Image (cartoon, grey):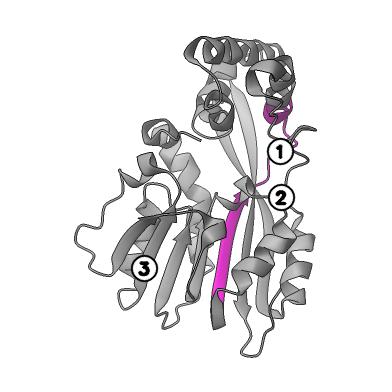
């Protein structure tokens, strides 16, 4: 996928609210190694490096475009690397991920895999969007079905790719308990954004949900796809104001001193 940092940050303040809540869930512990999985342009990674100056902090992301906008200036304990979350190596005392794991499948297995890279006593903290059943996503999937040939059958949450990997808070809590996690927090919270009609929803999704579709299309097909999606959005939200109730899941748990693997 081709990410655009400028598009992603057009709604910077609204997108930052969930990560502030996630950061508030972190206990102040003597972390030695911290990793931010799917760090994007690294703003939140910098916050981690500033808050835990004695820790070695790594920001990991697969997008060269996003990492090009990341900076380590003034923070000797911070570094960034390009890489995939599923190829993670090493062990960490804090594993942090904001709005990234929703792109990966099978979250029960994924949590077990990440758990093996967490040292005993370490903390896992994750935030994922859980808006896959919202009309904005439903209409996006419907649009993708109209462009099956151009997209090679890809639909983010459609039959070609399976259902959303995002679980319920209870399912995440149960999985973390299976892994012998302690101090488990798993909660759902709505972060509403008021947008200027259907065009506002389109602008919001350009930085996230639209990315995997437009990355698969040439310029002409991408323009056609966007226009078809906007037409559906306008039919659903014909007014000049949309209360966009965006749901997020926040998870945090600590690995016990004798906790097992996946």
The residue under label 1 is 132
For the residues marked 3 and 1, what is the alpha-carbon distance in whole angstroms? 31 Å
The residue under label 2 is 166
Eyeballing the image, is 217 above or below 113?
above
Eyeballing the image, is 48 above or below 210?
below
**What label does residue 57 carry, if any?**
3
Give the quarter of the figure containing the C terminus: bottom right
Please report contact status of discs 1 and 2: CB closer than 8 Å, yes or no: yes
**What label does residue 248 carry, if any?**
none
Residue at (54%, 81%) from the top-left corner?
119
Image quarter of residue 35: bottom left
Q: Earlier in the sequence, mark 2 or mark 3?
A: 3
Q: Does dot 2 land on a helix, a strand or a loop?
A: loop
Q: Is residue 33 visible?
A: yes
Q: Earlier in the sequence, mark 3 or mark 1?
A: 3
- Please state if 101 lies on the left or on the right of 130 as rendered: left
Q: Badge 1: how crowded within 10 Å, few (<14), some, or many (20+)?
A: many
The span picked out in magenta is 121-138
Q: Earlier in the sequence, mark 1 or mark 2?
A: 1
Q: Is residue 167 magenta?
A: no
């Amino acid at each position: 996928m081709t990410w655009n940092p400028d598009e992603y940050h057009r709604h910077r303040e609204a997108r930052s609210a969930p990560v502030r809540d996630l950061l508030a869930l972190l206990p102040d512990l003597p972390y030695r190694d911290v990793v931010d999985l799917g760090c994007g342009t690294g703003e939140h990674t910098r916050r981690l490096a500033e808050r835990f100056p004695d820790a070695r902090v790594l920001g990991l992301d697969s997008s060269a475009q996003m990492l090009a906008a990341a900076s380590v200036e003034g923070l000797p304990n911070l570094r960034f690397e390009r890489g995939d979350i599923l190829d993670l190596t090493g062990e960490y005392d804090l594993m942090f991920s904001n709005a990234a794991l929703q792109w990966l499948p099978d979250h029960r297995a994924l949590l077990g895999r990440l758990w093996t890279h967490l040292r005993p006593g370490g903390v896992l903290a994750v935030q994922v969007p859980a808006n896959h059943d919202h009309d904005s996503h439903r209409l996006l999937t419907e649009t993708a079905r109209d462009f099956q040939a151009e997209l090679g059958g890809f639909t983010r949450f459609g039959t070609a790719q399976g259902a959303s990997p995002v679980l319920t808070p209870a399912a995440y809590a149960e999985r973390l308990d299976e892994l012998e996690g302690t101090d488990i927090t798993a909660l759902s919270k709505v972060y509403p954004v008021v947008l200027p009609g259907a065009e506002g929803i389109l602008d919001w999704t350009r930085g996230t949900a639209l990315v995997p579709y437009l990355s698969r299309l040439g310029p002409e097909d991408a323009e056609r796809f966007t226009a078809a999606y906007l037409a559906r959005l306008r039919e659903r939200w014909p007014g000049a104001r949309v209360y966009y109730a965006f749901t997020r899941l926040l998870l945090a748990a600590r690995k016990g001193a004798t906790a097992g693997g996946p």
